[in-house]
Amino acid sequence: MAKVGENAAVRSLLALIALAAAVAGQYSLAVQFNAQLAAIGWAVGAAVFVLLYALDARGRELPAASESLPATSEWPLALAVLAVGAFFYTFRLSELPSGLNHDIAWEGLYSASILRGIAYTPYVASAWGRETLMFYFDALAIKLFGMDLFALTLPALVAMLLTLPFFYAFVRSQFGARAALVATLLFATAGWPLLSARVGWRSALQPLFTTMTCMFFWHGMVHARWRDFMLSGIALALTLNTYNAARAFPLLFPLFALFYLLRNRPFAAVLRRYAAGVGVMLLAFTVFIAPMAWYAAFHWIEFWGRANSLLANQTPEMLAWTGPRAAALLYNYWGNSDDFFVNTPLLEVPAAVLFVFGLLWCVLRVSDPRAMFLLLGLFVNLLPGLVTRPNANRGVGTMPFVFCFVGLGLLYFVRQARRLGRAGGVAACVVIAIAGAAQAGATYHEYLSQSRRRIWGFYPDATVVGRFMRTLRGKYAIAAGGANWPRDTLTYLTYAGGDDPFQRDYTWIDDVTALLRELPQAPPGQGLALILANIDASPGVFGKLRQRFPQAEVVDLHYPDDGPIVARALLLPPDAAPRSAAENLAEVARGATMWTGGRGTEPGKFNTPKGLARSDKGEFYVVDTGNHRIQKFDVKGTLIAVWGQFGSTPVSFNEPHAIAIDRAGNVHVVDTWNHRVQKIAPDGNLIKIYAPPKGFFGPRGIAITKDRVYVTDGGNNHVAVFDLDGTFQSEFGQHGSGAGDLFQPVGIAVDRDGLIWVVDSGNNRLQAFHADGTSARTIGVPGWEGDGVKEGYLALTDDGLVLADPVGNRLFRVHGDALSEIPTDNLMGPSGIASDKTTLYITERGRDAVTRLPRKKG
């Protein structure tokens, strides 16, 4: 076996097979979502790697810390790597971030309160509980650069830039200069730290102080210097002042100490060497953690409130299986985040492949203290996610350890290349160049190029609106609404000094139709600015207001500057005279008969109703989207039952959008932002929760036939197919604009010929599919163009297919290959559709009502 391992050709072949199989497996997992192919590829890659490790006795040892480079080579290369990182973290900074995240906006408002002299506290219980260290850096940036996005981005950006040299020093102290160079290069060109730098979250501080803690600690282990241990203790205390998930990090050191003592005997010699340094580390930690410890001691419930709330929803099954499974797939398959890494892994394909090989190498060398330190570091920083739900933020403390593994994975193959005789040095450089270029190219394409993917969580629309609102201060009283813009973002961007930064300098309008009845009052001498989103009922309301005030100025707000209209502003001068409330009410009431409705949270009231379904018994189920519930009525509009509230537990909802009833009377609810469908019995008891194997992202529509359930998966741009029990069968469609492609599909219905009709909203059309998922035909929707917001819904009625266009306030009937508009009077945001022999029933999200329309055939 040893002789085989000495054969360079055999080693090279095995290394290539391992890499090729792993790349194929990772591509199948993260890009094609083919679990079977992924399992085969990764099984082959891992098995061949282990075989290579077993055969190659000389290549088993981890790189030694003494593996150095000449100073004339190392430091220019290190500076070049740091420069690459600086480029990635700052390139197109004005475009990414594209907007202000709501969490960062809240933290910015608190930072503004610091500038007003609020008393110091290391922790605040508001907004789920937050450490305040980052807020003081934000406050300094606001003082220097003002209340804008850049001020809240800068501290996190600086923190991530500083992480790079400390990470280099940490890896160098453990594995030498070569490992430090390749690991830092891959860290500097990865998307996860790049986004952490640009979002502005306080969690961006955790990798910095975690890396500093580990670097100083390992220097202390190597040199036994008390000052290194002291700096490690200080950095450890600061780590706990960054983010809630950091509370598990201190476990690393007693666990590692126990391992180290058991491995190195006699104990007395170890204690003589390190007792003083560890004592100084504990003392420094105690001193610098004292403010946080004092707060925790006297505000125990508030300090642990967030953790306790997250743990309260965990079942034994989740703790035993769901959390560990999600953590195992976090870096290579699914980031689990609500924003940013919604349906993507934390690592790009090159880094994800190398991470697994580096991790395997350390597992095989677990007796090496350096490998054990990295493995324990990964484990303890995953603990917060393991016991709740792992995601990019709760696992951010693993970042330095993950990229140590990534660097080691690359270095293993570089080492194999270096042993290829006289050409080994060139081969090693080629391996590094290919890996670095592949990683940099993947990150650049994903996050920085002009064709980068859409990154959820930045709220560019709200940022455009907030910046415009700031220009109106003092001249107009401002009222805004019509979309779920994060209010903290608007409040931060409009704050210009005052008593309380959290006090809004504008009026938020939940129900934009209320503006047709009564307008907000402006102070004497000021005009009134009405800013409405360009979706749902808002365009209709805006049009009526514009007719009422022809002298008002209209300003269209775009994102990007040459992109679609995201909001419109109506600027009324101080002398504008609104019509009377009686006139306004008369206009709103004109039109179809109201069956039930009105905005509110009490039973029988609605908040933006969307989906609608009618059972064979004549009962109506209304998806009360804004109230996160389902309401059940009889045919006369009498309330029978209310199901659910906001949440992720069974028969709880997060903005459900659509509903359908199977032949057994069971109700299937598209629970959009819980990314699932819930099958509920007519009595309100849960039967099953279902989703496809790779998960939904924002499902929007549902249709049921005698044996199939079809669900539009808006974020993943396809239709998922299930049987009536919720068992996944297949899917069709993919992102694109050609025949059979879909872009942001919403409504769906199956006609009497078995064609599956989908509202292909991003492509401005309806598309019909055969049962096998092939495209049958397409119909363009009149008035839909560009990439503005559309959200059409479909239903099969007694008169055929009907399309509701809530943005255009229109209804269409499908006739073969054409659409004909159904005459209506004054609909506002029509969405859900149901019917009986004489009547169409429509949910109007703009009126928070269900409306009856007499059927007009033809």
Image: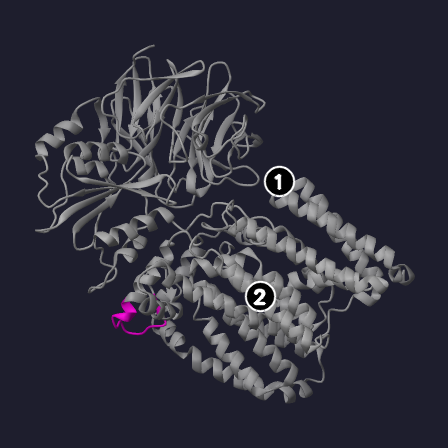
Q: Which residue is mark 1?
A: 32
The amino acid pointed to by label 2 is Pro
Q: Where does residue 317 sit, x and y in percent of width and height?
A: 54, 49
Q: Which residue is mark 2?
A: 400
Q: CA distance from mark 1 to mark 2?
A: 28 Å
Q: Give the image quarter of residue 803.
A: top left
Label 2 packing within 10 angstroms: few (<14), some (14-19), many (20+): many
* Vertical position of residue 776 compared to residue 71: above or below: above
270 vs 400, nearest the viewer: 400
| Residue located 53% across and 57% down the image | 192
| Residue located 31% across and 64% down the image | 146
Q: Where does residue 129 sit, x and y in percent of width and height?
A: 37, 63
- The quarter in which the N terminus is drawn is bottom right
Mark 1 or mark 2: name the one nearer the start of the chain: 1
Q: Where does residue 224 sit, x and y in percent of width and height?
A: 62, 86
- Is residue 465 highlighted in magenta? no
The amino acid pointed to by label 1 is Gln
Range of magenta residues: 113-124
650 vs 436, nearest the viewer: 436
Tell me if I can see residue 232 in this picture.
yes
How many dots with numbers? 2
210 vs 572, nearest the viewer: 572
Left or right, residue 690 beside residue 597: right
| Residue located 77% across and 64% down the image | 415
**Label 2's element?**
helix
